[in-house]
Amino acid sequence: MEELRLGPVVGLGTWNTFGGDDELAGDVVQAAWGAGTRVFDSSPMYGRAERSLAAALEGRREEAAVATKIWAPTVEQGMHQFAEQLDLFGRVEIEQVHNLVSWREHLGWLEEERTAGRAGLLGVTHYAPSAFGELGQALETRSFQTVQVPYNPYERESERRILPLAAELGVAVIVMRPLAEGELLDQVPEPEELEPLREFGVETWAQALLKWALSDQRVDVVIPATRTRA
Ligand SMILES: NC(=O)c1ccc[n+]([C@@H]2O[C@H](COP(=O)([O-])OP(=O)(O)OC[C@H]3O[C@@H](n4cnc5c(N)ncnc54)[C@H](OP(=O)(O)O)[C@@H]3O)[C@@H](O)[C@H]2O)c1
């Protein structure tokens, strides 16, 4: 199958950060936008994050790629979530089935939305290695063009089980938790230890970690989240 490449690029996650705080979301998106970020990941599971994101993307929508999710046990609830997303975003560039919830049930209507042009790429996500077997089954259907999994120096199971399959099937990989939810920032190397990475444009430990994941050629997008405004 032809390989689908979305990156390598740095996107922005929205879990646990600016849901509910439109002003913060606006500032974070503005800072990320200024740094060149154009892919934004969200979910109905993240409180008001989709709403905050939609407000923050006002005036920028045409250039942005929204990667959000369907997190619903039934088709009816899933279609309702999608209708709300269309109200917020107009269209969804990457529509992912969150945590594999009822993915077999959702596939039919999602494919119809893709054909109609209201959804772009279809994807599946899961955070837990215990679900990687089922994630693989979903990818094997060849109905999904993206997959989202954790990948950082603390969590490398996707390297063994998902990245090779994604590469084989031509599926684009979106990396959640590239900073291990901030845990990897607890021990920051001394500036001189980062010196060998400067020639690759790396100035900070966080940049080094993002580059670490993106350096794997099977990875397309990393989506770190932050509350830091600039
Ligand atoms: N966690 C999950 O299970 C999960 C599941 C599905 C999808 N996702 C998606 O993946 C996205 C990313 O995952 P995540 O938010 O769990 O974790 P993450 O991006 O690995 O880490 C976020 C943490 O890193 C800190 N951080 C970010 N940039 C930093 C910097 N330059 N220097 C120091 N600290 C920094 C943030 O704190 P500050 O706010 O202080 O910067 C925040 O606490 C989510 O937002 C969501 O869109 C996550």
Image (tube, rainbow, N blue to C red):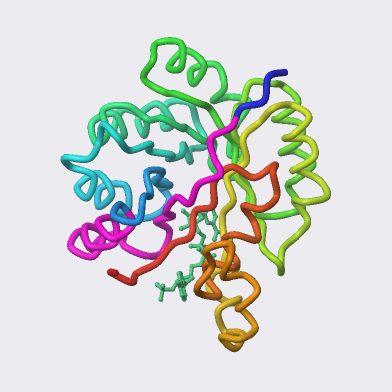
- Residue at the (41%, 23%) spot, across then down: 119
Percent coordinates x, y for residue 57 in the rendering: 23, 44
Percent coordinates x, y for residue 52 in the rendering: 25, 52
Vertical placement of residue 109 versus 13, above or below: above
- Residue at the (55%, 16%) spot, across then down: 108
Vertical placement of residue 89 versus 25, above or below: above
Which image quarter is the N terminus in?
top right
Q: Residue furthest front?
A: 199
Q: Give the extent of the magenta segment.
A: 5-32
Residue 103 visible somewhere in the drawing: yes
Q: Residue furthest right?
A: 160
Residue 164: quadrant of the picture: top right
- Residue 100 relative to residue 26: left or right: right
Q: Residue 11 in magenta? A: yes
- Residue at the (66%, 31%) spot, across then down: 171
Residue 192: quadrant of the picture: bottom right
